[in-house]
Amino acid sequence: MPLVRASRLAAVALLTAALLPLSGCLYAQIPVETPAADRPTTTPAPSDTPDAVEELPASLTFADGQDLPVTAYIEWGDGLISDDGWEVDAPDDGNGNWSYITRDGTCTAQFWQGTLGDVAVAGDDSATSDAIIATIVGATREEVATYGTDGELGYQAGGVGGVDARQVSGEDGDRTWIMTARGFSRLGVGLYVIADCTGADVEAILGEITEKNAVVVTP
């Protein structure tokens, strides 16, 4: 896996922080609870014809993302919450950011999920994924397209691939990191994870993270 040149991605140093919020053009995808006073007070009558539920694609390649129903909700499945090898480093901050740290303190896993605003590239999930990465590391989308590589995330269940993603990596002494992101341009949402290790095999840690934390899609 090629390492991103630190001189080209000037914001690599920012990754030394425990958790990276996205810039102001990205907003957390947080369901808004309807106030009780505004909720319907009557139960709708049952319909003889139930609403049709659109089927999800069998995989989520970059092209498959265009086939998702517009009602789909996409989020990380939290597979580290009960894992003995990890503990919470920073809880969900209400803006779609949270992180875990290994029990020995050598690696962190930084997660984000949220809406993309004008970061999304219409009709192109690969370019949208590069745009998410570019926003975080302070590069251009074209630089990420050049230096980045294709990756894969789990789909619906841990240990099962099927979600195309884009990723970049970097190093600073014995500290290494890999950022993997997937954007869904049709829905205007995305997510990423950053595996960041000091004195440990970051690729192995990323493999563990992606095996235990699938991308979960609800139609």
Image (cartoon, rainbow, N blue to C red):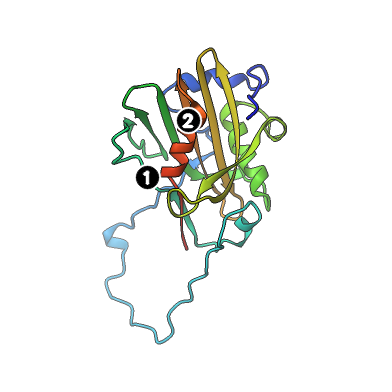
Mark 2 residue type:
Ala
In front: 83, or 44?
A: 83
Relative horizontal placement of residue 217, taking residue 148 as reference (left or right):
left
Establish if 28 lies above or below 18: below
Q: Residue at x 67, y 43 (%)?
A: 127
Say whether residue 21 is visible. Answer: no
Tell me the element at label 2. Answer: strand
Apparent side of residue 136 relative to residue 104 in the rendered image (left or right): right
Name the residue at 35% across, 28% down.
Answer: 102
Distance (Cα) linking label 2 and label 1: 15 Å
Above or below 197: residue 161: below
Residue under circle 1?
78
Q: Which mark is residue 20?
A: none
Residue 34 x/y as whole percent: 33, 58
Residue appearing at x 47%, y 63% in the figure: 219
N-terminal of the pair, mark 2 or mark 1, is 1
Is the residue marked by circle 1 packed among few (<14), some (14-19), or many (20+) residues within 10 Å? some
Position of 54 compared to 31: left or right?
right
In the rendered image, residue 44, in percent from the top left (x then y), is placed at: 33, 78
Q: Which percent across, then down, holds residue 177? A: 52, 25
Residue at image point 48% right, 25% down: 201
Closer to us: 186 or 80: 80
The answer to which quarter of the image holds residue 101 is top left
Q: Which residue is mark 2?
A: 195
Instruction: Examine the rendered structure and indicate whether residue 1 appears above or below residue 74.
Output: above
Residue type, mark 1 in image: Asp
